[in-house]
Image (cartoon, helix red, strand yellow):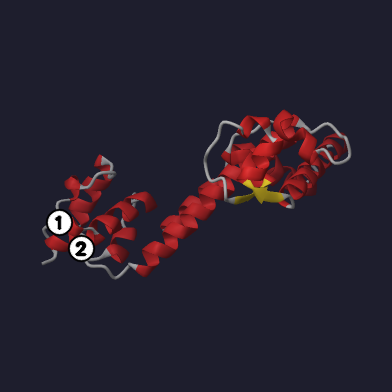
Amino acid sequence: MLTSRAEFRLHLRPDNADIRLTSLGRCHGAISESRWTKFSKSKQKLANLTENAENMSMSVAKWKRIVPKLQSSTKNEGKVLTAFELIHRFDLEPEDVSGVLNSENEIISPDAFERMKIEGRYRMEHERMKSKKLEIERESATEIPDHLDFSKMRGLSQECIEKLERARPRNLAAATRIAGITPEAIVVLMRYLKSPSGVNLSC
């Protein structure tokens, strides 16, 4: 439930509004032929660039040899990344990878590149939320002590603390059903309960 709401918000984001709505507008006769042609070309440029970037992968160490901007980075040198992942993780610009992605000597569209980079960031966030969801589901039966002091948990907002204090959920599954409790708050609560401090509380 929590993750579904968050995934919905990630989908309904401002940067992809034209992609989501232009096709719908076209079906209802609200989009002119010239605008539709321009939109279709932009969409195809984005699709081609993304496909190209996703099909190219190598270790960060190898990427450093061909992307000057990465020379000073020492992060994850052995990790294999696609160009798609590399671009948003290292906040690269078109000129940083033009020699790699420009297989047909076409100028990379700045708009398509920026859209692809933003999509990469949202996709990474989506994967992070899926991982949290699975972790929460595995631990959903974990009991929450009646006397637990939620205010002692670092990472919980005051709003979440107040909601948890009022509801006093019996376990993590019940906590996820409290309106306004975020997936992040559930993860904080879950990890606290699994920590030595949380274990001592249940003894």
Residue 146 lies in what quarter of the image?
bottom left
List the residue tagged with mark 1. 148
Q: Which residue is drawn at 18% across and 45% down?
A: 151
Give the tally of numbered discs. 2
Q: Name the spot of residue 145 as percent of width and height, x first.
A: 15, 63
Helix or strand or loop: what does disc 1 sit on? Answer: loop
Is label 1 in contact with label 2 (beta carbons under 8 Å)? yes
Give the amino acid type for the residue marked by disc 2 in the picture: Ile
Q: Name the spot of residue 149 as percent of width and height, x first.
A: 14, 51
List the residue tagged with mark 2. 144
Left or right: 88 in relation to 168:
right
Q: As displayed, is residue 25 above or below residue 69?
A: below
Q: Which residue is drawn at 57% across and 51% down?
A: 79
Helix or strand or loop: what does disc 2 sit on? Answer: loop
Q: Name the spot of residue 135 as percent of width and height, x first.
A: 39, 63
Q: Residue at x 49, y 58 (%)?
A: 130
**Mark 1: few, some, or many residues within 10 Å (few <14, many ≥20)?**
some
Q: Name the spot of residue 68 as percent of width and height, x first.
A: 67, 30
Q: Which residue is drawn at 77% across and 34% down?
A: 98
Q: Quarter of the image containing the C terminus?
A: bottom left
**Mark 2: few, some, or many residues within 10 Å (few <14, many ≥20)?**
many
